[in-house]
Amino acid sequence: MWAKTDESPSIKSKMDDVAEAVAAVKRDLIEELPKMRRAGWTDVSDLTVSVNALTPVSEPLYAVA
């Protein structure tokens, strides 16, 4: 999909929906958190990243007014 090959319109539409949902979370939740100052380095030596499988949804996760 990232290479833009054989991308169906329904998949593209769902990818756009996910991108909009992520933007809404950033805008409505993360930006409202208080800013906290920290000193020193951030240790990410034990950081792990996991990728979870997505399940298809039959309806959009948001409503457009």
Image (tube, rainbow, N blue to C red):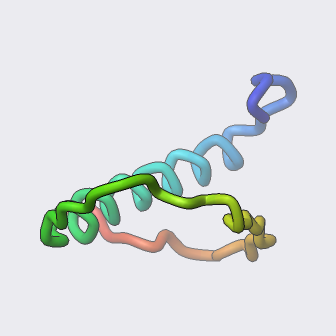
Q: Residue at x 60, y 48 (%)?
A: 15
Q: Quadrant of residue 43?
A: bottom right
Residue sitting nearer the eye, 29 or 43 = 43
Q: Is residue 18 left or right of residue 54?
A: left
- Measured from the top left, where is residue 22 in percent x and y? 43, 58
Q: How many marks?
A: 0
- Measured from the top left, where is residue 46 in percent x and y? 71, 67
Residue lying at the far right of the rendered structure: 6
Q: Quadrant of the C terminus?
A: bottom left
Q: Quadrant of residue 51?
A: bottom right
Q: Residue at x 72, y 72 (%)?
A: 56
Q: Quadrant of the N terminus?
A: top right
Residue lying at the far front of the rendered structure: 40
Q: Residue at x 70, y 47 (%)?
A: 11
Q: Is residue 5 left or right of residue 41?
A: right
Q: Is residue 64 left or right of residue 49?
A: left
Q: Residue at x 46, y 73 (%)?
A: 61
Residue sitting nearer the eye, 48 or 15 = 48
Q: Tell me if residue 62 comes above or below residue 26 in the rendering.
A: below
Q: Quadrant of residue 58?
A: bottom right
Q: Tell me if residue 2 comes above or below residue 52 in the rendering.
A: above
- Measured from the top left, where is residue 52 in percent x and y? 77, 72
Q: Is residue 57 left or right of residue 65?
A: right
